[in-house]
Amino acid sequence: MIEVVAELSRGPVFLAGEALECVVTVTNPLPPTATSASSEALAWASAQIHCQFHVSESRVALPPPDSSQPDVQPDSQTVFLPHRGERGQCILSTPPKILFCDLRLDPGESKSYSYSEVLPIEGPPSFRGQSVKYVYKLTIGCQRVNSPITLLRVPLRVLVLTGLQDVRFPQDEAVAPSSPFLEEDEGGKKDSWLAELAGERLMAATSCRSLHLYNISDGRGKVGTFGIFKSVYRLGEDVVGTLNLGEGTVACLQFSVSLQTEERVQPEYQRRRGAGGVPSVSHVTHARHQESCLHTTRTSFSLPIPLSSTPGFCTAIVSLKWRLHFEFVTSREPGLVLLPPMEQPEPTTWTGPEQVPVDTFSWDLPIKVLPTSPTLASYAAPGPSTSTITI
């Protein structure tokens, strides 16, 4: 019996283009007092990162596979296929790397191996939607002599920041200053430089503040004015907005605002279509604020963007966008007053109306949500960074 443990050095969340580092430890768990005949041996071990693509057949219509190209993967238990037994299609993978060959461990002996690979920058982000799913995994395959391959899978979460594909790593040392007292290889410098560049771009895109005002009205007049200070956010930030109802000519009885994602399948892959031939869209609500606001002059709300959610993205199959979805309940009666008069000639009993005719309408405001620091996402939403299997 051999125990294999894979541990990610910096949590399970990464930015596309970063280097993933994993320590693989192989141990013979028998006590050291066991005889030498209890030694265990592994023929080889290899590791590879791959992305599995799942679709909902009721929502997505994929083209049939090309039957003219034969399957060149041999159906053998001695071939390392990281996605064997997985659902969906493997749409992205890194070259496999051999960790060791012909390893023999005495009772109580343990050996560790380091695996490092750069996550492909051209891949989609990790996403579990209602129409499609993109799932990243690090798969480690081990095989004993005359035995089938055993696969150890470590789940990953990958964030994608668009625009980094066109960035070139500076070759001139003067362009990328570094400390002469630190030893760092070229791959480490590139990884550090890319992460620093991504952080600077995220900060620049989400730090700009400028008040945007929107007049809200229905068919009978103005309801109020909505104000928001920016339209680009990072995961983990709060969407803060203000609503001024004092200038409205139509009484607003209640309003609600929801922070939602809109998952839309591209038209050529859409299977379901709604009324009028418009493709159906899946909406998921991540935060919601509701308030009764009659006789309210000004109010505000704050909706947190979950760190576990997926930033907006677009692939050939599906797109994901963020929005604020407002719903207003307004009175049909002009100059509606539901408070008792302040001055009464004599004591009277006042009651409000039992029924108020109302109208409802909705309004959507698109916003943009970008990734955040992978370290912050790992700390705030921790996931399993260690996986174990026994052979």
Image (cartoon, rainbow, N blue to C red):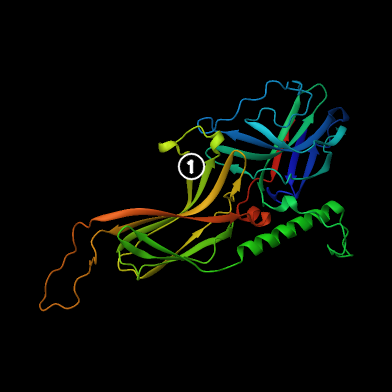
Displayed quadrant of residue 316: top right
Q: Position of residue 308 (x, y in %)?
A: 58, 50
**Residue in the foreground of this view, choosing between 48 and 332:** 332
Q: Quadrant of the C terminus?
A: top right
Expressed as whole percent of the image width and height from the top left, the position of residue 124 reads 65, 43
Q: Is residue 97 left or right of residue 370?
A: right
Q: Which residue is mark 1?
A: 282
Q: Residue at x 68, y 35 (%)?
A: 91
Classed neighbour count for the residue bearing mark 1: other residues with Cα under 10 Å, few (<14), some (14–19), many (≥20): some
Q: Is residue 105 above or below residue 322?
A: above
**Residue 294 percent across, percent down from the top left:** 30, 65
For residue 57, say whether it is visible.
Answer: yes
Q: Amino acid at mark 1?
A: Ser
Q: Quadrant of residue 137?
A: top right
Asked whether 143 or 74 is in front, the reply is: 74
Residue at left 17%, top 78%? 343
Does any portion of residue 28 appear in the rendered image?
no
Q: Is residue 212 above or below residue 389?
A: below
In the image, 291 versus 163, the foreground residue is: 163
Q: Is residue 377 left or right of residue 364?
A: right
Does residue 254 lie above or below 129 as drawn? below
Which structural element holds mark 1? Answer: strand
**The one of 337 and 348 positioned closer to us in this rendering:** 337
Q: Position of residue 143 (x, y in %)?
A: 79, 28
